[in-house]
Structures are given as structure tokens and as C-alpha cells.
Amino acid sequence: MRFHSKLMLIICSLLFGVIVILGATFEHMLAEALEKEIGTRALHTAKTVAEMKEIKQAFYTDAPAKIINPIAEKIRASTNAAFITVGNLQGIRYSHPDPDEIGKQMVGGDNEAVFAGNSIISETVGSLGPGLRGKTPIYNDAGQVMGVVSVGFFLEDIYKTIESYRDRIVVVGIVTLLLGVACTMLLACSAS
């Protein structure tokens, strides 16, 4: 094999390796940033709902779900969240996108920390499927936890967004590789 051919092969291989490593690193950083941003948005929305006077007052009525669910559904629609679930200390739902789920037990197993007074972001499987959710306690006037708000986004939707960016990364990588190969060939031809 001629020297120019070896040089061209080495440069193209190196260029390919660098593009793959940079592309994978960028995709990983994008996925982490997107999940953090969506988790933070979910938690901020949950905190906003938990502070609403109408939500807190509804806990003291005979039918909290009749008041809470319409409010939660309106906010869910305006924020594009997959769900906003409000529940009591027993984990019984007062709101849910599926009306048949109201009055049933919350699913996901991540309420303990919230009932202890902590706001969390968690990734778990709920009644609607795998999701990234922000959860926060609802406090009564005495400062005691009386319920929980859970706002979630489907992981599938997050992964679709990441995939759309992955496609762009691949296109940019291929174009860069082709330009690199073309420049390498020009250099090899002019050197001979």
C-alpha cells in the first residue's frame, strides 16, 4: 500500500472516530439537559398547583375531586403535561386525565419522600406508563402535609425529541465526514 493511501486511511479513520465520539457525547449531554429541564418544569408546575387556594380548600369538601380535577385538567392542557394527579395522604387520587382512575390509589411508589415534606423529581411507571414526574406536598394552613401533587411527562415523548436531534447529529456527522474525506483525497492527490 502506498504512503498516500495509508495516510488517507489513517486520517479518514481518525476523523470518523472523532465524529462518532463527539456525536455520542453531544447526544448524551442533550438527553441529560432535556430530562433535567422537563423534570424541573414538572416540579415547578406541581408546586404552583400545590399552592393554589382552590386546591387546598377542596380537600375540606365532601367531594374534592369535583373541584380539583377540572382545575388540574385545565392546567395539564395548558402545560402539555401527560398528567397532573392530586392525591390525599392515603394516596387516593382527586384528579387524573382518565376519570375512571379518580378515587383509586396513586401508582409509582414514590410518595413517601413527598409525604415526609420533600419535593422530588422521579422517573417511574405510573398508571399511564413510564414517566418523568415532579412531585411536591400540599400543606394545610398549619404547615402539615395533607396531600401530594404529581405532574408528569411521558418518557416516550422525551425519547422522541432526543431521537429527532440524533437524526440531525447523524446528518451533520456524515456531511463532516464526507468533507473530511474529500479534503484528504485532495491533499493526497496534490502531494503525489
Image: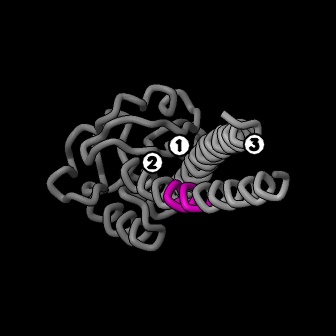
Rendered location of residue 85, percent (x, y)? 36, 51
Q: List the residue tagged with mark 3.
A: 4
**Which residue in the rendered view is the most extreme toward the right?**
191
Residue found at x 64% / y 54%:
177
Q: Amino acid at mark 1?
A: Thr
Q: Amino acid at mark 2?
A: Val
Do the CB atoms of the residues marked 1 and 3 lie less than 8 Å apart?
Answer: no
Q: Secondary structure at mark 3?
A: helix
Q: Which mark is residue 9?
A: none
Q: CB under 8 Å between callouts 1 and 2? A: yes
Would residue 35 be seen by someone viewing this image from the given angle?
yes
**Is 166 included in the stretch rendered in magenta?**
yes
Q: Residues within 10 Å of mark 3 (few under 14, many from 20)?
A: some
Q: Inspect the magenta stretch and tell me whether residue 188 lies in it.
A: no
Q: CA distance from mark 3 to mark 2?
A: 66 Å
Q: CA distance from mark 1 to mark 3?
A: 64 Å
Q: How far across and how far down the image is residue 76, in percent?
A: 41, 65
Would residue 9 be found to the left or right of residue 118 on screen? right
Earlier-in-chain disc, 3 versus 2: 3
Q: Which mark is residue 149?
A: 2
Going 19% across and 59% down the picture, which residue do you hit?
99
Q: Rate crowding at label 2 as few (under 14), some (14 to 19) or many (20 or more) other CA atoms within 10 Å.
A: many
Res 111 → quadrant: top left
Pointer 1 residue: 136
Could you say whether the residue bearing mark 2 is in a helix, strand or loop? strand
Q: Is residue 25 visible?
A: no
Query: In which quadrant is the N terminus drawn?
Result: top right
